[in-house]
Image (cartoon, rainbow, N blue to C red):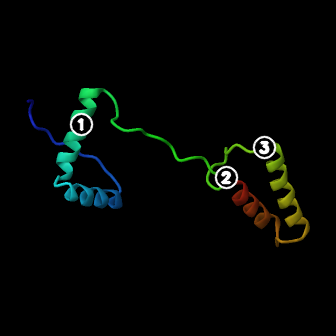
Amino acid sequence: MGQIVNVNFKMDSDVKKCMEEACAEMGLSMSAAFVIYAKKVGRERRIPFEITADAPSPERDYYYPQTEAQLLSRIDKALQQIKDRHYTDAAEAGAKLRNEFGL
């Protein structure tokens, strides 16, 4: 066994609290849990669980795949709102369009 060293990193306080609670329920300290994780990564040469991204969504993702018809429908809706004078000025219209289209 090598020399014991300190490893420091930052994480969100809510994530830390949740992990501390989970570790306590398993009878582990966070330090012990990270050592277990580090040993497994070193031994297996991989992250010991699957890492995935959240599924894309039109509300969050500007590059969310859309059909041409969906995109044209959103543009037509925005243009109709402008024609119906739902905006007081061009800046407000632009801001609402940027928000709606995720720009």
Q: In the rendered structure, which disc, 3 or 1, sits on the residue that comes first in sequence?
A: 1
Contact, CB < 8 Å: mark 3 with mark 1?
no
**Image height of 12 relative to 5, above or below:** below
The quadrant where residue 47 appears: top left
> Label 1: how many residues lie within 10 Å, few (<14), some (14-19) or many (20+)?
few
Q: In this figure, which residue is indicated by the disc labeled 3? A: 67
Question: Marks 3/1: CA distance?
Answer: 44 Å
The quadrant where residue 48 appears: top left
> Label 2: how many residues lie within 10 Å, few (<14), some (14-19) or many (20+)?
few
Q: Which amino acid does label 1 sit on?
A: Ala
Which SS class for mark 2?
loop
Q: Which amino acid does label 2 sit on?
A: Pro
Q: In the rendered structure, which disc, 2 or 3, sits on the residue that comes first in sequence?
A: 2
- Give how far across and how far down residue 93 sits, in percent: 79, 64
> Which disc, if any, is residue 38?
1
> Which residue appears at 24% of the width and 27% of the height?
43
> Which disc, if any, is residue 58?
2
Question: Marks 2/1: CA distance?
Answer: 37 Å
